[in-house]
């Protein structure tokens, strides 16, 4: 029996504890003291408390770098994981800032508390290398996100999306749990590194293949890769904007991180190869198939969308395809390329949802025609949207360009001496060219099309302008000086 | 490392910030844009002075005089791409020159552009230009230099085409952009080649930079296809970039046309700074140009430097010849600029960095002076640019006349008192000592004669004799201009103080700068070479300096005398009367006036070929590629039609069937989503099965 000091454990999970306490504070302050207060005040107080909690957690993490791996990999704290926690917390902060000023719900403290709980689960997710804790954190995350999706009670869309999300998530969780249990059965361990140690075989055994594919189904659901993406368009469209933003940003970053951990650490000797004329069965070809289908389908279907949120959803599917390339190349640089890509992508998409929320607040919809002439009605948000969409399309000098460049370079150099993965890179580049079309379509509505007659300028609060401007600025800055972020990864 | 070296980036950052802010400003914020631009330039100038003083005081020797600051930009694969900036005497001198001349021209522009409605945009572009140019100067990485170089080209394009509503201005802007692009392409290829050979684009990086000994030794040792050292090939490609930017033959055609831009732009960009960037580039990569293995070469001159010298010499005479027969006040100066840039190239080729750079610095001052003077003349004469229609302006514009005369004498190289004399003399002296050939020396001397001649011609046309301004107007535009002679002559006026002050300051420098580069006290030379200068009067008598000085003085006097004989002895009376030279040699004059028909030759060859090629491409695009795209798009349309029909007639009825049989909860769901979620989930199951089957099948195979 391992003897263990629980005080040390508490010390290691202190950031998570801080965020949980913040969530409880938000709930109790709102329910005890502010029952009769106005919505604006309640949002301000709740948001301030939540932001303070997140900020305190970040400060705590920054205080000291720690190395620890306890309880059979259930809690693995190292500088990289800590930085991922910071990334998640920063994205949460931005999500909360976007939430301020929303009017879709009366249950403010519950909403904020759920966001914080989702954050806690993501923080656990990035600091574990144990199958059991991975599953638990994913479930906690998913359950919070289901509720967040359903939160707009006045909208049938919101409820429908949440139900779909829930059903889909339930099935995926079942797949994931089944896959994990098979891995456990094969290796007699739930620690990723021991799993990798015990599944070494000369050739893949069918049971292991089933386990790999099941894991891929479960995690593919989280990252919205084809063919496990069906929930994404409905959820992106139906969920309240801050919820959709959280699902698209922080949850994506954490999920990709854990997908990388599971595949690269846990299935280290079952990778196979998807190189041209060098095919070997394993999880890499599986990821290659999923990635290429995602890129093709995501980009092509996005062209047809007339709702900006659905467009962003399909673009998210396409981006998941690009990011899977980073996982399947799994060289020394891959992780930093993947994380740079996912973090900058998350920032960008968060900003885009901020603008979408703004337009919805004014016009009541997110159809392309609702964006007509936005540049005349709200110049600054339009400029930010321009930066976000061009970054998503990968136009230099924005962060999206450098992310793609770095990612594709690592894929190219992952098979030294041969051009084995060139076909994937060519596909990815061709598909990014396609993507420019639909991003520009949105921009055309914003900048070229005339606003509807009699449309007044949109009043945008200073806070929202500052938040959007900051996100846009960081997208430009990270693109011009990628080293600002890269040296942390 | 001192504060100034670490923060050298601030010098270009200030104008860049000003450009960004005025880009956001509204059109009517004229004062703000002007004061931002001038203020930022003033700050840059002060910082440049600090940097200059720092370099002078540190008084480093040779290589140690270079202080660099490098930083990693980003990593790709296993390699870090680094950028950086450097401070050495070359940088320091250029910084002070660019920011000082820039500052004066900014101030001048507030007067010159005061009536223009796009005043704000003008200062935005000017500031952006200044930022990019200062970036070129401080770059310690060929890549950073190239980026700023392109930015400079972009702003040049924007400013030449500033009055884009004039078709000539728009065409000139395009011409400038495209012509310099040809040189830049070679520059880019050279840069990529250099990177693939040395693995670094930093100039100096503690022994591993591409201009340092180990890299150069490797480049020299490598021979390429036609027995040329890699260093020579790269140097020539980079020089091609300089040829484009500095308007050397055969890429000089854009610079005269660039005079369509506002005059301050011509002064700043197309006389003092940007066109000199090519010369600066050659000076910056001089170690590469001069790299040789020390065995196979008998003399010190490498192939690359010989090419530089010959191109420079040909350009110097070629452009001076054309200048003799031009009538537009600014075009004469433009050809003169091309010719002087040729001198700088000769100086670099035969005498090294210091000789070429000294002429660059002195030329920047007196040519900016001449252009601003020309601007003042144009401004005073109500946008008249044809010298045949001017005349007699001495009376109306005394300050402009006096300063212009100083600039003209400096450009001609009037002995002893003007900076141009000393810098040109240094070039002639070095050319005379060149062991490869004496021809560049003769060409340069002939060019000096021409320079004195065409400047005298211009002076007589513009400032002496009687005013012909009204007569031309009246004879050609009687209908448009109702007023008679008195009206126009009386309205010719001296420019405001904001324009004449910069002229006076520049004139002062056009005289004084000569002091720092005389043979007796070659401070500039020693400074660039990292030595300390000593005053010794005997410098005049050593190494054949005196004969060259005497020769060049005689040549200048001969040119001035010829000019007087042709144009001064019998006053020019009418704008229509033929040029004195034209009466003497009509054929030659016509060829010169038409600029040796270079534009026409290019039209008949490259441009016609290009037009033909674009016709062919257009045909291919229309019929071949478009056809292919059309076919593919119709196939896709057909497929999507098929998919939709399947969906409508096959899949949907299936779900309807299924929906009828489910339980209450299912019916609720069915109402919500038409049963599609089940379908999704089924698809996940199918995907799972297919993927497993595929992996197992391919694993067993």
Image (tube, coloured by chain):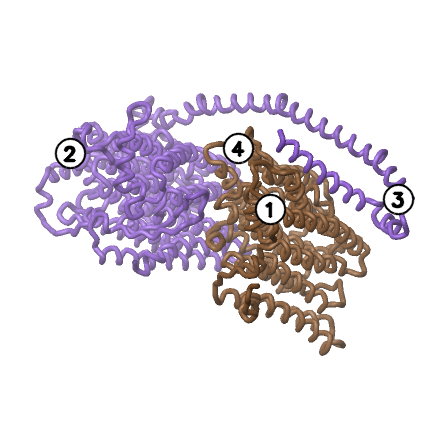
Query: Is circle 1 on the same chain as circle 3?
Result: no
Placement of B398 over or under B308, stated as above or below: below
In-front residue for pair A47/B490: A47
Q: Colour of chain B?
A: purple
Estimate the spatial distance between the alpha carbons at disc 1 and disc 3, rounded to whole Å: 40 Å
Q: Is residue B82 left or right of residue A210?
A: left
The crowd level at tag 4 (other Cα within 10 Å; few <14, some 14-19, many 20+) is: many
Q: Which chain is brown?
A: A
Placement of A228 over or under B610, stated as above or below: below
Say which mark, if any, is on residue B433. Answer: 2
Q: Is residue A249 left or right of residue B150?
A: right
Query: Is circle 2 on the same chain as circle 3?
Result: yes
- Dot 1 or dot 4, earlier in sequence: 1
- Tell me where residue B479 appears, x and y as whole percent: 53, 38
Identity of the residue furthest to the front in this view: A1
Q: Chain of mark 3?
A: B
Estimate the spatial distance between the alpha carbons at disc 3 and disc 4, rounded to whole Å: 47 Å
- Tell me where residue A222 appears, x and y as whole percent: 67, 50
In-front residue for pair A422/B597: A422
């Amino acid at each position: 029996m391992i003897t263990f000091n629980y005080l040390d454990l508490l010390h290691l999970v202190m950031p998570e504890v801080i965020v949980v306490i913040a969530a409880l504070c938000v709930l109790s302050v709102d329910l005890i003291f502010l029952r009769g207060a106005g919505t604006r005040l309640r949002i301000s107080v709740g948001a301030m408390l939540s932001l303070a909690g997140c900020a305190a957690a970040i400060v705590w993490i920054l205080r000291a770098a720690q190395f620890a791996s306890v309880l059979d990999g259930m809690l693995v704290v190292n500088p990289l994981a800590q930085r991922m926690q910071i990334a998640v917390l920063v994205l949460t902060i931005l999500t909360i800032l976007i939430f301020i000023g929303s009017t879709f719900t009366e249950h403010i403290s519950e909403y904020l508390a759920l966001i914080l709980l989702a954050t806690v689960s993501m923080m656990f997710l990035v600091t574990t290398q144990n199958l059991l804790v991975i599953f638990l954190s994913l479930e906690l995350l998913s359950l919070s996100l289901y509720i967040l999706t359903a939160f707009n009670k006045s909208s049938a869309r919101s409820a429908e999306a949440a139900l779909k999300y829930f059903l889909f998530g339930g099935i995926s969780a079942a797949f994931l749990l089944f896959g994990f249990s098979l891995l456990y059965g094969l290796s007699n361990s739930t620690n990723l590194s021991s799993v990798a140690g015990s599944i070494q075989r000369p050739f893949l055994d069918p049971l292991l293949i089933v386990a790999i594919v099941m894991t891929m189904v479960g995690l593919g659901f989280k990252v919205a890769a084809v063919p496990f993406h069906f929930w994404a368009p409905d959820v992106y469209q139906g969920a309240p904007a801050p919820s959709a933003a959280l699902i698209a940003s922080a949850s994506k970053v954490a999920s990709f991180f854990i997908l990388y951990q599971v595949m690269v650490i846990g299935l280290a000797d079952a990778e196979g190869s998807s190189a041209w004329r060098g095919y070997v069965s394993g999880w890499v070809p599986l990821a290659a198939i999923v990635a290429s289908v995602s890129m093709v389908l995501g980009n092509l279907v996005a062209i047809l969308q007339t709702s900006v949120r659905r467009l962003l959803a399909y673009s998210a599917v396409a981006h998941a395809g690009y990011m899977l390339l980073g996982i399947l190349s799994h060289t020394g640089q891959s992780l930093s390329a993947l994380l740079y890509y996912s973090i900058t992508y998350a920032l960008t998409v968060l900003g885009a949802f901020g603008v979408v929320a703004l337009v919805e607040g004014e016009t009541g919809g997110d159809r392309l025609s609702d964006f007509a002439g936005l540049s005349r009605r709200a110049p600054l948000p339009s400029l930010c949207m321009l930066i976000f969409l061009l970054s998503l399309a990968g136009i230099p000098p924005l962060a999206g360009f450098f992310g793609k460049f770095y990612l594709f370079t690592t894929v190219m150099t992952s098979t030294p001496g041969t051009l084995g993965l060139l076909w994937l890179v060519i596909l990815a580049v061709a598909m990014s060219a396609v993507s420019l079309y639909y991003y520009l379509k949105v921009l055309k509505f914003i900048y070229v099309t005339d606003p509807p007659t009699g449309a007044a300028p949109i009043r945008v609060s200073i806070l929202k302008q500052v938040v959007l401007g900051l996100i846009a600025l960081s997208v430009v800055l990270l693109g011009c000086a990628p080293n600002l972020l890269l040296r942390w990864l | 490392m001192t504060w100034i070296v670490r923060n050298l980036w601030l010098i270009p950052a200030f104008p860049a910030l000003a450009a960004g802010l005025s880009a956001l400003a509204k059109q009517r914020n004229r004062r703000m844009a002007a004061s931002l631009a001038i203020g930022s330039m003033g700050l840059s100038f002060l910082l440049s002075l600090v940097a200059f003083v720092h370099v002078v005081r540190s008084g480093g020797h040779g290589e140690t005089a270079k202080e660099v600051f490098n930083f990693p930009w980003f990593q790709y694969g296993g390699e870090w791409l680094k950028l950086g900036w450097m401070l050495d005497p070359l940088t320091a001198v250029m910084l002070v020159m660019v920011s000082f001349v820039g500052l004066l021209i900014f101030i001048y522009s507030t007067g010159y552009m005061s009536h223009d409605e796009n005043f704000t945009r003008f200062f935005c572009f000017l500031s952006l230009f200044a930022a990019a140019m200062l970036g070129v100067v401080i770059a310690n990485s060929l890549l950073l230099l190239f980026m700023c170089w392109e930015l400079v080209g972009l702003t040049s394009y924007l400013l030449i085409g500033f009055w884009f509503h004039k078709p000539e201005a728009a065409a000139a802007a395009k011409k400038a952009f495209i012509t310099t692009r040809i040189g830049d392409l070679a520059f880019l290829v050279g840069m990529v080649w250099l990177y693939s050979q040395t693995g670094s684009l930093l100039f100096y990086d503690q022994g591993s930079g591409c201009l340092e000994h180990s890299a150069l030794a490797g480049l020299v040792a490598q021979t390429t296809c036609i027995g040329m050292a890699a260093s020579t090939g790269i140097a020539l490609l980079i020089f091609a970039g300089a040829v484009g930017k500095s308007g050397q033959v055969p890429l000089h055609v854009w610079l005269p046309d660039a005079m369509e831009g506002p005059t301050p732009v011509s002064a700043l960009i197309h006389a003092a700074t940007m066109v000199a960037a090519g010369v600066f580039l050659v000076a910056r990569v001089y170690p590469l140009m001069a790299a040789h293995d020390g065995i196979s070469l008998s003399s010190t001159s490498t192939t690359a430097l010989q090419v530089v010298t010959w191109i420079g010499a040909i350009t110097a005479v070629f452009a001076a010849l054309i200048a003799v027969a031009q009538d537009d006040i600014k075009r004469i100066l433009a050809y003169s600029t091309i010719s002087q840039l040729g001198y700088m190239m000769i100086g670099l080729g035969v005498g090294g960095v210091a000789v070429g750079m000294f002429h660059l610095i002195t030329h920047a001052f007196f040519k900016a002076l001449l252009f601003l003077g020309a601007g003042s003349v144009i401004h005073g004469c109500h946008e008249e640019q044809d010298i045949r229609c001017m005349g007699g302006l001495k009376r109306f514009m005394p300050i402009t006349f006096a300063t212009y005369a100083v600039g003209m004498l400096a450009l001609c190289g009037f002995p002893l008192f003007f900076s141009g004399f000393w810098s040109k003399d240094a070039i002639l002296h070095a050319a005379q000592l060149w062991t490869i050939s004496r021809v560049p020396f003769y060409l340069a001397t002939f060019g000096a004669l021409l320079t004195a001649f065409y400047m005298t011609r211009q002076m007589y046309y513009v400032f002496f004799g009687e005013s012909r301004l009204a007569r031309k107007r009246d004879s050609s535009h009687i209908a448009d201009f109702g007023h008679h002679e008195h009206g126009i002559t009386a309205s010719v006026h001296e420019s405001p103080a904001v324009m004449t002050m910069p002229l006076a300051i520049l004139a002062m420098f056009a005289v004084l700068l000569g002091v720092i580069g005389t043979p007796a006290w070659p401070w500039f030379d020693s400074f660039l070479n990292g030595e300390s200068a000593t005053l010794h009067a005997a410098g005049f008598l050593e190494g054949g300096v005196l004969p060259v000085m005497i020769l060049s003085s005689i040549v200048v006097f001969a040119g001035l005398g010829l000019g007087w004989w042709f144009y001064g002895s019998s006053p020019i009376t009418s704008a229509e009367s033929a040029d004195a030279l034209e009466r003497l040699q009509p054929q030659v004059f016509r060829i010169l006036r038409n600029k040796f028909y270079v534009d026409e030759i290019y039209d008949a060859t490259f441009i016609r070929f290009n037009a033909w090629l674009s016709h062919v491409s257009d045909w291919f695009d229309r019929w071949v590629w478009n056809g292919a795209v059309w076919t593919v798009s119709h196939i896709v349309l057909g497929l999507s039609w098929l998919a939709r029909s399947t969906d409508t007639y096959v899949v949907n009825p299936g779900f309807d069937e299924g929906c009828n049989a489910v339980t209450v909860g299912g019916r609720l769901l069915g109402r919500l989503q038409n049963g599609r979620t089940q379908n999704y989930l089924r698809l996940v199951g199918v995907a799972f099965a297919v993927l497993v089957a595929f992996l197992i099948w391919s694993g067993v195979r």
